Each structure stands twice: as C-alpha cells, then as structure tokens.
Amino acid sequence: MQKLVNYDVIIDIDLIENITGANQYFEVFFSTKEKIRYKIVLEWVWDMRYSIENANIDRFHEFRTCLPEGLIDNGTFIVEDSEYIKYFEQQVMGTMPIDKLKHYIFYDTVDSVIDVLTEKKPIIIKI
C-alpha cells in the first residue's frame, strides 16, 4: 500500500508559482507563508504530473487515512510503494529500468500538486 514519508528537506510550500523546463530538467518556483522564495531543481525526470488536489481527492484521502506517525505536513514527500511507478513501469514495458526510480510529491496550500518520477533527489534552493 502506498504511503507518504517526509522528504529530507522540511519546508512549507504556500504557493507553487511557476514550473519551467523540458528534456528531463525542470525547475519549480514556490514561496512560503513567510514570502521566502525557493526553487526545486529536478533532473532526470522520467515523468511528471501537475494537477489540482481536487483531482486527487480519493488518492489523498487514502494517504491521509494511513499517515505514519511523525509525518510532518510540509508539502514535500516521497511516496513509498508508489502506484504511479507501477503504472509507469507498465507503460514503458521494460524499455527503461525503474529500480532506482523515486516518486516525489510537492503540494501547496491552494491545492496545486506536482508528482515527479526521477532517479535524482530534488534540490531545494533559496532564491
């Protein structure tokens, strides 16, 4: 069963402002409630989805009913036993190895949700 765990960097995302990039490299710009701006650098992105949380009601309901103790609601998570990775594996039908692939979720207080499949850890930089 899928479950959320805290990402290494604990930070509250108030507003995802912009997403730029292409060719497996993306930058996500966001601000905190304190109006401090950051960017998330994503390299070797194999797949990415951007949606509003409203489109993820069932999925997030399931995550929230199975929250592990100590989970900090910070807007940056890793998904263990990811259904998204399983779906992606079926889509690429063995043409890409998925053994090092991780599923990251970034979400803000206005219900923007970014799901990212990548082999590299996201880097969060204050700007």
Image (cartoon, grey):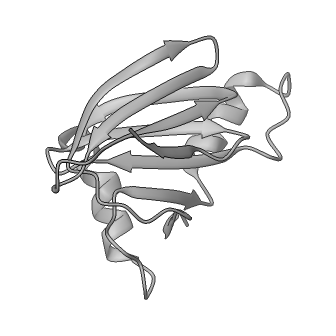
Residue extending farthest to the front is 127
Nearest the eye: 35 or 72: 35
Q: Is residue 48 above or below residue 33?
A: above
Residue 66 in the figure: left or right of residue 99: left
Nearest the eye: 93 or 70: 70
Q: Is residue 35 above or below residue 52?
A: below
Question: Residue, x 31% and y 57% (percent of image)?
Answer: 60
Position of the N terminus by quadrant? bottom right
Q: How many marks?
A: 0
Q: Quadrant of residue 73?
A: bottom left
Position of the C terminus by quadrant? top left
Residue extending farthest to the top is 23
Question: Residue, x 85% and y 34% (percent of image)?
Answer: 97
**Where residue 105 sits in the image (x, y, percent)?**
45, 48
Q: Quadrant of residue 76?
A: bottom left
**Where residue 109 sits in the image (x, y, percent)?**
17, 51
Question: Residue, x 35% and y 32% (percent of image)?
Answer: 29
Question: Residue, x 41% and y 78% (percent of image)?
Answer: 71
Residue 104 in the figure: left or right of residue 109: right
Nearest the eye: 86 or 52: 52
**Where residue 89 sits in the image (x, y, percent)?**
72, 35
**Where residue 10 sits in the image (x, y, percent)?**
43, 66
